[in-house]
Image (cartoon, helix red, strand yellow):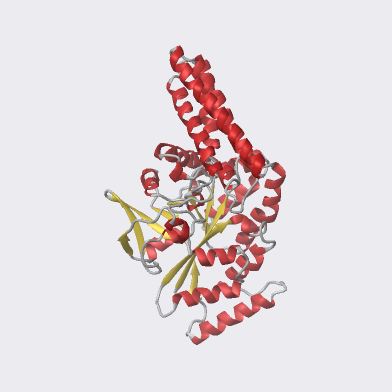
Amino acid sequence: MIYWAPLLHFYQPTNQTHWVLRKICEESYRPLLKLFRELPNAKVTVNINGALTELLDDHGMSDVITGLRDLCENGCLEFTGSAKYHAILPLIGQDEMLRQIVLNTQTNRQFFGDSYSPLGFFPPEMAYSRDIVKPVLESGYKWIILSGVACPVAWPTNVVHGVSAGRQKLVTFFRDDILSNKISFHHLDASGFLDQLRELQGDNSDIYVITAMDAETFGHHIKNWEKLFLGEVYEALELMEPKGRSGKQLQRIVDTQKEIFQAAGKKDKTDIEVVTLSRLIELFPQGQSIEPRASSWSTSLDDIKDDNPYPLWSGKGNVLHQLQWQHLRIAMDMTYKAMKVATTAPVKLHADLARNLLDKAMQSDQFWWASRRPMWDINLVHQGLLIQREVLLNAYKAIKMSDLSEDEKMEYYYRVVAGRDIRSKITDQLLLYG
């Protein structure tokens, strides 16, 4: 038996424009929901960050939320946990990691209700370091999914490894990066995918294969890919006849499946079963304790050798990234101080504004668009900087109105000045290299 566990990651930044969000819903999210409604026996694991859930509701697109909730209640999908504003967790410190995880859970439970009870965790961009294990376990999660490049041992296909933390163990799944990228970049059709699964099985008995990619891949990045790939794979696995499609390729897949099943003495059951990731824990034995490599799903082995685990968000030698993180850390330090001195209502007002804005200011997109690998967009980088600037504005306002001594207030004013200087340097970088 081959167990295929697909994961789809739904995410858009909190400052996404209405027209882009609407386009993504029309091209990707709604067609995906329709597909799964028509295939009641299909299974999928879904991550949706709380920032997007909130955004969908704010922009009148709550039918996507309802659709996901219904699919979960019908047993078609399971949710994962994550970080609400899609921060790169290894780069923000454990307290902030835990805060982002808790905010994500609170937001998604508000909209999905009791159906949102995830067992597993999807770190944004699959960015991993040992530091994220503790907050993930403290939040009650049983498993985490990482990029295949993070795997430090022989590739697991029939055993489930885990990361130990004291007496606890976090089950660790690895996505098949090669197979996932072939699907994401339209280098593999449904028939080829099924063939590759069997090649991976070889002479083994039961194995599992995990694929994971952005939900927007299907329909938004690649037109009709939810039908031409996912739909055809799911229907082939269920031995469903093509329903009036221009289905020569699908019919070929189905006919091939039937021949294989008949040769193996199987009439009503495929040799490939689609499952949620949590189901793999029940199906496969526990493996060894491992130490995954610090990495992301955009990290190469060369990056790891070069001690560059998060190249698209904190790239080695990327001056713009260095400046962005310097500015964000000033904003973080000032916010912590503002919260500490918020003893009166007027001070608390600005301190709370700074704290809530800081959560959003940690979103990964501003760094991704500054990576030049090859992503580059000066406006999206600048939008992230503007949120950080608002954090500084409100944090210092709270400090200025507090009972701190004038000397302490002046110390934090110097940090405001330092932030202004860094922003100027960032702007220069955007102008010079834009």
Q: Nearer the viewer, residue 108 or 394?
A: 394
**Which of the 4 image quadrants contains residue 228?**
bottom right
Return the x and y of residue 274 as percentages of the image width and height: 50, 67
Q: Nearer the viewer, residue 316 or 162?
A: 316
As drawn, 41 above or below 132: below
Q: How many marks?
A: 0
Return the x and y of residue 18 as percentages of the image width and height: 70, 42
Residue found at x 67% / y 44%: 434
Residue found at x 65% / y 47%: 63
As drawn, 361 above or below 183: above
Return the x and y of residue 226 as percentages of the image width and height: 64, 62
Image-based side of 37 in relation to 308, left or right: right
Residue found at x 59% / y 75%: 191
Q: Nearer the viewer, residue 384 or 315?
A: 315
Quarter the N terminus occupies: bottom left
| One can see residue 186 in this view | yes
- Single out the residue that lies furthest toward the front: 432
**Which of the 4 image quadrants contains residue 190?**
bottom right
Return the x and y of residue 312 as percentages of the image width and height: 54, 50
